[in-house]
Image (cartoon, grey):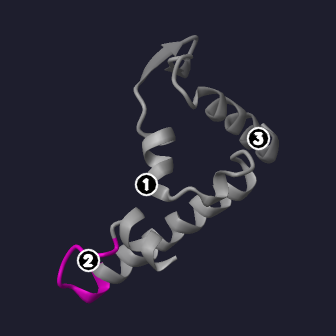
């Protein structure tokens, strides 16, 4: 967990010399860490729990896409040829089921 916080969230170096600002930064990153762990356990396919945050960021979160506005809705268009596009679509469906949307 410590390695993941340091390397995956950038907690190896605090942003400034102010105690309260660093504490807020640290607590925000802990919440982000917990959200990603919950995402890995409940939304992503089996076997993805072992992947690090850096791996998830590269494979799932920092992919090229186009945002399109159509019929008063925002649509995110991802290439169907992206190696993890099916994982993204399946994960989205699980989130919709969990939230009741």
> Nearer the N terminus, badge 1 or badge 3?
1
Alpha-carbon neighbours of circle 1 within 10 Å: few (<14), some, or many (≥20)?
A: some
Q: Nearer the viewer's eye, disc 2 or disc 1?
A: 1
Q: Secondary structure at mark 1?
A: helix
Mark 2–mark 1 distance (CA, rounded to whole Å): 18 Å
**Picture quarter with the C terminus:** top right
Which structural element holds mark 3? helix
Find residue 1 and report its horizontal and vertical position in percent.
52, 76
- The tag earlier along the polypeptide, 3 or 2, is 2
Q: Position of residue 11 (x, y in %)?
A: 34, 73
Residue 96 spot, x, y in % from top left: 75, 38
Task: Name the N-terminal-most of marks 2 and 1.
Answer: 2
Looking at the rendered structure, which numbered label has been put on residue 94? 3
For the record, the magenta segment spans: 11-21
Asked which quadrant contains residue 5, the reply is: bottom left
Residue beneath the point at 50% across and 64% down: 32
Distance from disc 3 to disc 2, alpha carbons, whole Å, reads 35 Å
Residue 14 numbered tag:
2
Mark 2 burial class by Cα count in 10 Å: few <14, some 14-19, many 20+: some
- Name the residue rendered at 52%, 66% in the picture: 33
**Predominant secondary structure, magenta span:** loop
| Left or right placement of residue 60 versus residue 46 in this view | left
């Amino acid at each position: 967990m410590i390695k993941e916080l340091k390397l995956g969230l950038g907690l190896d170096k605090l942003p400034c010399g102010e105690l309260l600002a660093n504490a807020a930064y640290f607590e925000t990153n802990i919440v982000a860490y917990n959200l990603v762990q919950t995402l890995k356990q409940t939304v992503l396919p089996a076997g993805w729990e072992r992947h690090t945050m850096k791996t998830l960021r590269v494979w799932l979160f920092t992919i090229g896409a186009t945002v399109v506005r159509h019929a008063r809705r925002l649509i995110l268009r991802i290439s169907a040829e992206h190696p993890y596009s099916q994982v993204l679509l399946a994960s989205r469906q699980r989130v919709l089921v969990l939230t009741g949307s």
